[in-house]
Amino acid sequence: MHIITLEADDHEGRTAAAMLLVEGFRELTPQTWPDLQSAQTEVEEALDAAKICRVAYDEAGTLVGWIGALELYPGHVWELHPLVVRRSHQRQGVGRALVQDLQRQVAVRGGSTIFLGTDDEAGLTSLAGLDLYPDVSANIATIRNVHDHPYGFYQRCGFVIVGLVPDANGFGKPDILMAKRVA
């Protein structure tokens, strides 16, 4: 596997990245990128020079993963958005390698923290369907991963939960906010 910057003139790579977004989010959050056109728009926006846009290719030359980031707090915090790995290549270290590569990219730019939001729209955590108010922090302390929610992957990569946005996607569908210091 090798990880490179996705370039604006790489039309084949841009199309493959867009198709990967549609495929990768179809099951859990199909409304995120419901079609190729919306995913292509996301890829185009990710190619902005002020952002990070990295892709992973397997030994056969197939695009198997994509990670992006944008600067939130100049010089300090970058938001990881998006991360997607081809279903056939999940649980093989592609996502972890992309996260590690992103850490290096952020560090080179002087960043100190990577931040992300990972929604629970499909009822994959113990927070699903609950009214998280008034004590949101108590709910953070008791969260459980009941159906393989991606926050578990991010924890294994060193991210910690730093907050929740209750009802971010409708009642009982929170956004789980996570962050990691870049070493």
Image (cartoon, rainbow, N blue to C red):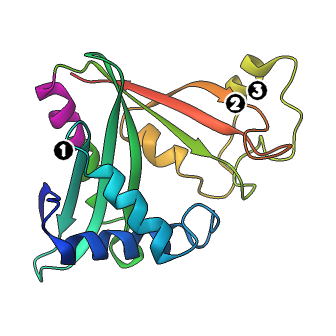
Q: Looking at the image, do the residues carrying marks 1 and 2 touch, with CB atoms under 8 Å apart?
A: no
Q: Residue at x 75, y 55 (%)?
A: 123
Q: Position of residue 145 (x, y in %)?
A: 65, 47
- The location of residue 150, given as percent across then percent down, is 53, 51
Question: Which residue appears at 18% of the width and 44% of the height?
Answer: 101
Quarter of the rendering containing residue 66: bottom left
Q: Which residue is mark 1?
A: 101
The residue most toward the bottom is 60
Q: Quadrant of the C terminus?
A: top left
Q: Is residue 104 visible?
A: yes
Q: Identify the residue under disc 3.
A: 139
Tell which tag, 2 or 3, sits nearer the viewer.
Answer: 2
Give the labeled residue for mark 2. Answer: 165
Q: Quadrant of the N terminus?
A: bottom left
> At numbered mark 3, what does the secondary structure look like: helix, strand or loop?
helix
Image spot of residue 38 (x, y percent): 49, 67
Disc 1 crowd rating (10 Å Cα; few below 14, some 14-19, many 20+) is some
Image coordinates of residue 128 in percent, x first then y, are 79, 46
